[in-house]
Image: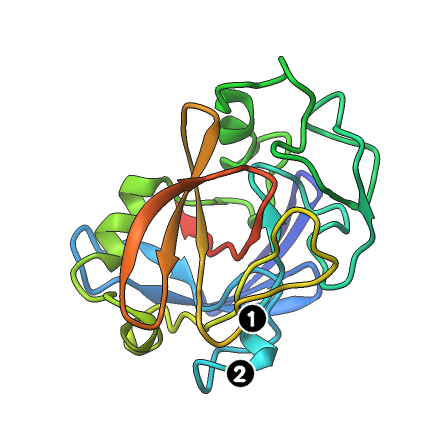
Amino acid sequence: LAWVERSNKIIIEGGEKILFKGLTYGLITSPNPPHRVWLDRNLGASQVCTSVTDTACYGDLYQWGRAKDGHESEGSGTITTSAASITPPTTKFINKTDWVSSGIDSNGDLRAAAWADGGDNDICPAGFSVPTEAELRLATTTKVKDIATAFSSFLKLPASGGRAPGDSKSSGVGVSAPLWSRSTKKSFGRFFAIYTKNASFQSINRSYGFSVRCIKD
């Protein structure tokens, strides 16, 4: 079965594989109720992780609520000019506290909706979305307590690190595994902060670049 929906071309092979933007993803089911289906690797990763420091499974690092426009790639250029909309005409990583200008989507509601299936900045395959904090909690909190358990969990999360505003490349590689949700709190994005000795859900400026794992709606 094959079909084209929006600009996202998807091919289902036996119901277990998805070809999306040049990469083939598998589907995995959470062992935790309500047993949701997820992609088997981070967006942009070329393979499932073989170790917690497997660079081929790190994937891309997205600014919160932003589309796949080139900024998510390791080593993408940077600018210090805030975007005038949530769909900026630039491929560069925007080095500001928030990557949109003051007064534009201050509470994050537009970008939270834009990261859902069919949204303006949809980065997941059709039928999938960036998870909410609640969805990510259901899949992880019973098992993921640190970097080691993040990798041993069904999601096989790597220590891919993240990219801070002002940085030209990622940092924290090997010791952190920050994962975005599409949930927002005040002027911040919500993410799952995973480190060598602990893990918790936290708020952070939306201009950080973190990994994304898509969930089936």
Q: Quadrant of residue 56?
A: bottom right
CB within 8 Å, label 2 to label 1: yes
Q: Which residue position holds label 1?
A: 58
Q: Hey, which residue is sitting farthest front in the picture?
A: 166
Labelled disc at residue 187: none
At 46% from the left and 32% from the top, the residue drawn is 188
Q: Around disc 1, counting alpha carbons within 10 Å, would you say few (fewer than 14), some (14 to 19), or many (20 or more)?
A: many
> Residue 87 location in percent, x, y?
72, 29
Give the Cα separation between the discs numbered 2 and 1: 7 Å
User: Which residue type does callout 1 highlight?
Assistant: Tyr
Taking the image as shown, residue 169 lies to the left or right of residue 65, namely right
Q: Which amino acid, mark 2?
A: Asp
In front of the other: 78 or 1: 78
Q: Residue at x 30, y 78 (%)?
A: 152
128 vs 183: above or below: below
Q: Position of residue 83 (x, y in %)?
A: 75, 27
Q: Position of residue 84 (x, y in %)?
A: 76, 21
Q: Which residue is mark 2?
A: 54
Could you say where residue 26 lies in the image, as x and y percent from the top left? 47, 70
Say above or below: 115 vs 144: above
Report the residue that reaches farthest toward the bottom.
Answer: 50
* Colour logic: rainbow
Local SS, label 1: loop
**Residue farthest toward the top in the current orientation of the protein:** 103
